[in-house]
Image: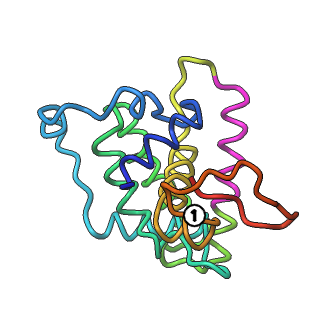
Amino acid sequence: MNRRQALSRVSLILGGAIVGANVFLEGCKPADKKAMNGLDFSEKDIAYLDEIADTIIPETSTPGAKAAKVGAFMTVMVKDCYDDADQKIFLDGMQKINEAAKKKFDKNFVDGSPEQRHDLLVEIENEQKEYNKNKKKEDPSHYFRMMKELTLLGYFTSEIGATQALRYVESPGRYDGCVPYKKGDKAWAI
């Protein structure tokens, strides 16, 4: 199974509960529209997104999101699968995080300590939760929710996430509907 197939299956399992879910159900944009919007991410942007993702899923006993190259995954998903409005929200969100870091600790986000980055993203997540409480159906999604969902999706569908953070049994294989599970065991990868 390749990554594209895994993403399709994850989106169906989630029932389209993620931001931009219509993309997964309807497919990505046609090639001619992708070329027209001109969205391009630099290596610096990818490294910046890797740092955001690694703050969300840091290295512990398993590799973090940066090791799974989640920043590159996010750029592909945003470029190929998000509509223009969501792309703008995502890009603006990248700037807002950096501006908030400069305001809070007089440095760019990537230059902050892991503790400073964590504290900043916790504040932004609380802001996002408050936004979602008062959000109307027609209101756009919050940029941090997009980033967090793409981080989780990218990490847990990567080889590192599926084989080291989750338990993994290569498929196809024998179906065993009754696998023992003990409290504290890792969840199963799809």
Label 1: which secondary element: loop
Q: Which residues are magenta?
A: 121-135
| Whether residue 73 is situated above or below residue 126 in the rendered picture | below
Q: Is residue 37 magenta?
A: no
Q: Residue at x 54, y 31 (%)?
A: 16
Residue 106, given in percent of the width and then of the height, sits at: 54, 72
Image-based side of 92 in relation to 179, left or right: left
Q: Is residue 133 left or right of residue 148?
A: right
Tell me: 136 left or right of 108.
right
Image location (x, y in percent) of residue 142: 55, 38
Above or below 162: residue 124: above
Question: Mark 1 highlights which residue?
Answer: 169
Query: Residue at image x 50%, y 71%?
Result: 160
Query: Looking at the image, which is closer to me, 158 or 82?
Result: 158
* Residue sitting nearer the eye, 165 or 41: 165
Answer few, some or many: residues within 10 Å of disc 1's Cα (few below 14, many 20 plus, some between 14 and 19). few
**Horizontal side of residue 48 vs 114, given as left or right:** left
What is the quadrant of residue 161 in the picture?
bottom right
Q: How is the image coloured?
A: rainbow
Seen from this angle, which residue lies furthest right? 183
